[in-house]
Amino acid sequence: LPRGTGGPGGVGEATGIGDLRAWLRAGEGVVTEDVEVTSWRDQSGWKRDAHELEFDRRPDLVSGVGPRLAPAVRFDGRSHLLIPRPVEDDFTLVAVFASTSFTANFAWYLSPAIVGRGDRSGSCGRGQEYHLGINGQRPLFVVAGKELKGSGNYSDGRPHSMIASRLKSSGELNLFMD
């Protein structure tokens, strides 16, 4: 797949000094043992590499996904990676995913995450938790305990794009799909 110049889609700069704070691309910087991902190099220049937490809960690197037959990192609902917190103040998260999960939980921190950090215990610092994921087939974005739930069914196994943003001064959350 074309990489473009700069950041994803040519937006921003992948220099480690710009606004692009983390960029994980399945076609670049993925280190595996067999097909299991042990680490995933951040392409933004900020060196926020993702690493395995538990050797028996690694995601898999797969090929031939979607209409462009691109590589992808497949998380099965148990697998996960640890990434240093890439967000602070005002921020925007962009994720491209495909899901067949019908899992729904009453508490956001128990629902499947695409990217996130923290729980209600305050283990990552009060007000620093965030979550972008799918809960009961619907998009969910949470920052510092404030939830924004989207509508629609996005657990159909097809690729989708999700963009979520937070404006710290007002606490405003936005969530956009496809």
Image (spheres, grey):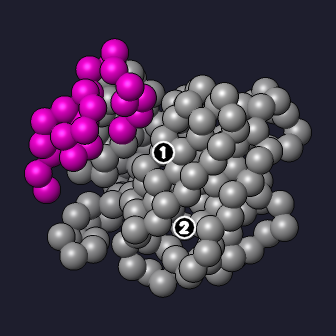
Q: Nearer the viewer, mark 1 or mark 2?
A: 1
Residue receiving disc 1: 93
Residue positioned most to the right: 121
For the residue marked with disc 1, what is the amino acid? Leu
Residue 141 drawn above or below residue 118: below
User: Where does the C terminus fall, quadrant-wise?
Assistant: bottom left
Report which quarter residue 30 is drawn in: top left
| Picture quadrant of residue 170 | top right
Q: Main secondary structure of the magenta part?
A: loop
Q: Is residue 17 magenta?
A: yes
Q: Position of residue 13 (x, y in %)?
A: 25, 27
Q: Nearer the viewer, residue 115 or 4?
A: 4
Vertical comparison of 10 with 79: above or below: above
Please give left or right for residue 69 compared with residue 23 in the image. Answer: left
Q: Amino acid at mark 2?
A: Asp
Is residue 89 something that shows in the picture? yes
Tell me how far mark 1 sits from mark 2, CA to CA: 21 Å
The residue shown at (56%, 31%) is 90
